[in-house]
Structures are given as structure tokens and as C-alpha cells.
Image: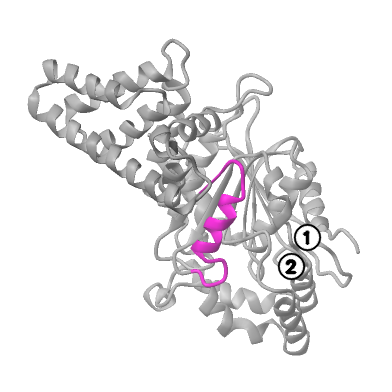
Amino acid sequence: MTIPRLRGAFAPGTQPAAQNELLVLLPSLGTTMALWDGTVEALRASTPGSTLRILRVDLPGHGSSPAVAEPFTIAELADAVLGVVEEAGGGAFHLAGLSLGGAIALELALAHPERVKSLALFCTDSKIGTTEGWEQRAAAVRASGTASLVTGSAERWFALGFLEQHPLSPAARFLSTLIDIDDESYARCNEALAAFDRTASLGSLRAPVLVVSGEHDAVTTPEAMQTLTERIPNGYHSTIAGTAHLAALEDPDAAARLLTTHLRASASPAQPGATSPHEQGMRVRREVLGDAHVDRAVAGTTAETAPFQDFITRYAWGEIWARDELSRRERSIATLASLVTGSHEAEIRMHVRAALTNGLTRAEIAEVILHTALYAGLPPANGALGIAKEVFADLDAASTADTAESPESSPNEGAERG
């Protein structure tokens, strides 16, 4: 095994700064660093005064990186990427990769956690495909060249009808780029993926992780990407609508929006060892609303709603709810009163449950609603009380079902859970 020599392209920030953040982008198998051109352009357009430096790196035998004949592992590719980063100035950096690039990014974050500030995994997994499948593709490329992969790649890479609807899109040229990639280097990349499996290590990831899937991706499906996210301590998942495996290439604007939000949420904490507002917010949010509720909200995140999800996580939960001046019990009282006043029925349901979690009894919740009726009016309070009764009934039904299913449960267990 050997560490390949990789080459990259470096773009400085558009504005000078004493300490510019670095974002490293890694492409998919069979493509070059140009896969990220549209995303970089969108990043620059959205933040014209950006100090962000961007480094894109090509895979072995792809684009500007030399061809290889010797075998290598994903871990050695990660070390090779780190070597390019050192040449660009070193230090800690933000990291994003797509497919094979995502596997390399994941390996680098696990092997060198002190170097990775944040991680974005596009259309990838801790184990992609099967060992046999990659070995068969390596053999096919050695026998017939990368040109034999064009038809299959078009079906995997792009959503149905994308190439016909966007014949002049820069994405269309990537099928011809595939033909120019060195056959043996491509085969070696396949063999590296065949041996790659980091599933057992996902729980040790410490950097904030954005997981992005393509809605129509049949290789790393949205369902598989959600499963990946659930195994990561500080991860959240978003799906880019209307795209397949090369989601960032098909919709670079959406990819840029997700990356921008992720980078802002992953900004370095002011105090060494402190958590970021997003990390703290996610912890408080889960403690108050419960994992099931937060997991549903995160799973439903799209490129359009990601900024709002980040906003409420950082500001509502990471700053206001995290303050010590009021207890969570007191904050639940204030929140319920505010929601009743505004007749925000969907939020009332959620915060009745949160109030129970924060220590209020059912009688106290009803008393808060009664007191609010004096100042907010009878109709909104009446509606809120009806919602509270529904929540209590749902909890009682769930507790009864749990008791019926568990013969060892005590007779009063359902009541205690309420």
C-alpha cells in the first residue's frame, strides 16, 4: 500500500482577514474537482465579502492528480488529502465530500479529529455498496476502460430527465470527463471502496456533521443517509429535491445554501473546549422536546428549511432556553402563556408535552391556561385546554398500551408516566 500524490486547486478568500477559515472539497469517483464549481460560485455569490478559503482536491488519476498503479486504502487517501492541506497552509479546516470524496472525508474526520472543524457528507456512507460489486467494477474497467461506464453512470449520477432538460448544463460534460480518467487509477479507487467500512466508528465522531442526500439517489438513498445520520452523535440530515447521486452537481445552489448554514452553525466556539450554540441548542432541544420529536424535525429538513432549523436550534434553544436566569419549568410556564395568547395551536401541543418533561403537572398546566384566559381571552384559552386534554389522553393511551404489552409493569406505571 502507498499514499498517492494528489493535487488540488486553491482559491483564497475574496476579502483579507487575519485568520481565514479553510473549506476542503472532495469529489466523487469518476469526476474531478470541477464537480464543485457551481457550488463554489454560489458560495461566493451569497457571501461576496467572504474570507473563506476553498481548496478542492482531485482523486488519483482524476483531473490534475497523477495516475497510480499501486494499491491504496481510503485511509491512505485521507492522509494524501491532509498532505495537500499542509501544502496550502495547514491548520484545522472544514471538510466536505461527495460519494468517494465523502468516504475519504469521513475517514479523515475519524483519524484526525483535531483537524476537522466540521464535516459535510454528500451522497455517501460509512460503507458504500458491496465488496463484490466494487471488485467486479474494477475488473470491468481494466477490461473495457472507463468509457464502458458512461451509460450506467448517467443513470446513477442524474435524476431521470435531468440531462434532457438541461443539455447545456455543466453537469452534462462530466460523462465525457469520465472517459479521460485513468483506468487503473479508477480500478484502484474501486478496490479501496471495496475494503472500506467505518460503520462501527461513527459514534466517535465529534465534529458537527451535515448529511445530504439526493431525493432520487439509488446508490446512497435518502433512507440510508437518514440511518447514517442517526448513528452520528452531532449530525443532521437534509435532502436536495429533484437530484440523484451527484446532488451538488445537479443543484449547486441548494448545496451552497446547506454548506453556508452548516459552516455558520459550526463556527469555532469562543472558549476552548466550549460547545457551539448549535451543539448546545441541539442538546437542550432534545432534553426538552425529546429525541423522537427532534429526529422527525431533522429528518424533514430540506435545503429551503435548513436555515430555519439552524436558527431555532442556535437562538431559541442554544441561547434563550439555555440561559440560567429562569428554570426550564418557569420557561415552560412563560412559553405556554405566550402560545395561548397567540392561539398557536400546533406549538401548544408540542409545549404541553415539553412542560410535562420540565416538571409541570397536568393540574399546573391547566392552571397556567386558566390564568392566561384572564388576560388573553376565553376562546384561545378554551382551545388550548382542549389541546392539552388531547395530549393527556394520547399519553394515557400510550401508557396503557405499554402496560398491556409488558406483564412485568406495575399497575400504577401508566399514571406515573403521565
- Label 1 amino acid? Ile
Q: Nearer the viewer, residue 318 or 181?
A: 318
Q: Which residue is mark 2?
A: 193
Tell me which residue sits at (33%, 41%) in the image: 396
Q: Which residue is mark 1?
A: 74
Q: Nearer the viewer, residue 270 or 42?
A: 270
On screen, 256 above or below 278? Answer: below
Asked if residue 151 lies left or right of residue 57, the reply is left
Residue 335 in magenta?
no
Magenta stretch in the rendered image: 217-236
Q: Are marks 1 and 2 in contact (CB under 8 Å)?
A: yes
Left or right: 168, with 65 as reference point = left
Identify which residue is drawn at 43% across, 53% down.
Answer: 254
* Total number of numbered discs in the rendering: 2
In this rendering, the answer to whether 91 lies above or below 293 is above
Taking the image as shown, residue 402 lies to the left or right of residue 142, namely left
The label number, if any, that marks residue 258 in the structure image: none
